[in-house]
Image (cartoon, rainbow, N blue to C red):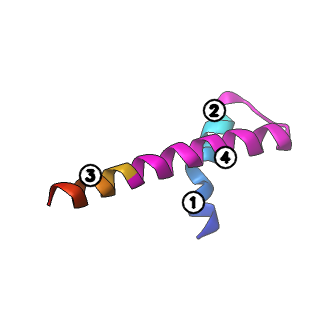
Amino acid sequence: MFRLLMLPSNLVCDRLGISDEHERGMVRMLVNTLIWITVLITVLTLVWTL
């Protein structure tokens, strides 16, 4: 489950060529935050309009 949640951010880190674990952590946090905020706003918008 954890690997599935981290897959998009790990792909971004690999694509950017980031190898330092601390930098990867920061990028993973940014990408995961953006993904979850997008999901949350989408769900709230759907609930609000129904």
- Residue under numbered circle 1: 5
Q: Confirm or deny contact between disc 1 and disc 2 (CB under 8 A).
A: no
Which badge, 1 or 3, is on the more N-terminal residue?
1
Q: Look at label 2 and name its amino acid.
A: Arg
Which badge, 4 or 1, is on the more N-terminal residue?
1
| Badge number at residue 45 | 3
Q: Look at label 4 and name its amino acid.
A: Met
x then y, percent, for residue 48: 22, 57
Estimate how packed mark 4 is, as few (under 14), some (14 to 19) or many (20 or more) residues with alpha carbons within 10 Å: some
Which badge, 1 or 2, is on the more N-terminal residue?
1
Where disc 2 sits, the SS reads helix
- Residue under numbered circle 2: 15
Main secondary structure found in the magenta portion? helix
Quadrant position of residue 16: top right
Q: Which residues are magenta?
A: 16-40
Which badge, 4 or 2, is on the more N-terminal residue?
2
The furthest residue to the left = 50
> How many numbered tags mark residues here?
4
Which badge, 3 or 2, is on the more N-terminal residue?
2
x then y, percent, for residue 49: 16, 54
x then y, percent, for residue 9: 61, 45
Which badge, 4 or 3, is on the more N-terminal residue?
4
- CA gap, disc 3 to disc 2? 32 Å
- Residue under numbered circle 4: 29
| Residue drawn at 52 percent across, 43 percent down | 34
Where disc 1 sits, the SS reads helix
Nearer to us: label 3 or label 2:
3
Between 12 and 34, the residue placed more toward the observer is 34
